Image (cartoon, helix red, strand yellow):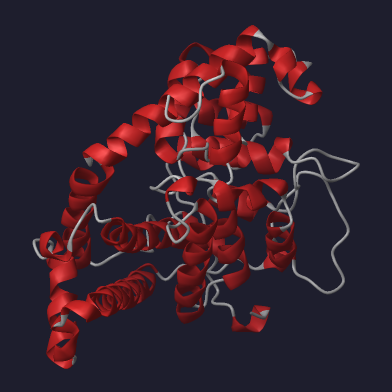
Amino acid sequence: MTAAALAPYACDPALSRGRRFVELAAPTRSDFQRDRDRIVHSTAFRRLVYKTQVFLNHEGDLFRTRLTHSLEVAQLGRSIARALGLNEDLVEAIALAHDLGHTPFGHAGQDALNACMAAHGGFEHNLQSLRVVDHLEERYPAFDGLNLTFETREGVLKHCSQKNAQSIEAQEPGGVARRFLDRTQPSLEAQLCNLADAIAYNAHDIDDGVRSGLITLAQLQSVELFERYRVQALAEHPDLAQTQRTRRLLYETIRRMLSEQVYDVIATTQANLQRAAPASADAARLAGPLVAFSVEMKALAVPLKQFLFSQLYRHPQVMETTGHAQNVVRELYQAYVAQPGEMPQDYAVRTDTHRAVADYIAGMTDRYAAREHERLTGRKWPV
């Protein structure tokens, strides 16, 4: 999207707050396009293909991974950004980078690693994503990390505790953590990515949950946000009621639900922008949350989230796998802290052993973590 096509409240790469290390501009790409390209070529991005979303990587070839989830968030984000006059390239960069710090085994891995690190600063995947792009990627001779723009880094840091924000602020005064201390908002592009993330994972977790057999269409009929569009789909395509067309009914219902949520975000945000009338990207940051669902859609989304939590994320089969995954992470952590030399040398020689171990484990894919656990303990999954 050219600068002329951007709304006044969008982030313009020509007005970026810049990079931590000054670089000459690229001749054919904007700074946000360059950020996106650096993320796509990063090691951490490639690893996402073998990192869990809900179902572990070895449980099936068609379940979402962190990589496919990130691509879906980017697609939704760009579609909404285009309608609102926001910067699509920035939205895409944030969407593709937002999960780079996720551990193997999804939230189970994060929870286990956070517990292990409780006495050493804790672990949070969102903060780790920023750590990946700022420090852990090693691709350039003059600096660590990817040296992304402020705007992309601001979007990557979705959540941050006061303690962590103060720590980042001390190292980078007025930087990406300042808004958590000032209680202001990130860019509209970052706000959009947060909402696109929620829209994407609710939809694809329904799909993966039904595909896995852990939840059924009959159960989902109790969720109004889903049932409304299932009924619509059947009214227009009665043949979808046939057993052999159940998969098509599921897809059509999810498609309609996704579309309606996207249109709702666009309409609600347009109304919010008209009311607040921000004249610049910085003015939008001071105007409170502007990218949002309507009150009705937000109310419909909550029961869906609650349903997925109770019926899918807390399903006994998922919980059993979660327990195995957490054992792997805990035992890997204990083994590496006891014997740092079992890690690659660049991790083993670091003075902060605990953070080095956390960085190393967080960077693992599901299958690599399982292999390392077997190598160090002699026990195969499940453990």
Q: Nearer the viewer, residue 353 or 4?
A: 353
What residue do we see at 55% from left, 63% from top? 281
> Left or right: where does residue 152 sit relative to residue 198?
right
Percent position of residue 77, x then y: 48, 68
Residue at horizontal 16 percent and vertical 59 percent from the top: 299
Q: Residue furthest left?
A: 222
Residue 140 quadrant: top right
Residue 174 showing in the rendered view: no
Of 281 and 339, nearer the camera is 339
Front one among 279 and 17: 17
State whether residue 154 is above or below residue 202. above
Residue 253 shows in this picture:
yes
* Quadrant where the image shows the N terminus: bottom right
Q: Residue at x 75, y 50 (%)?
A: 19
Place of residue 205 in the rendered image (x, y in percent of width and height, measured from the top left) = 33, 57
User: Residue drawn at (76%, 44%), measured in percent from left and top?
Assistant: 20
Q: Which image quadrant is residue 211 in?
A: bottom left
Residue 244, percent from left and from top: 22, 79
Q: Is residue 188 above or below residue 243?
A: above
Callout count: 0
**Residue 103 position in % (x across, y down):** 52, 36
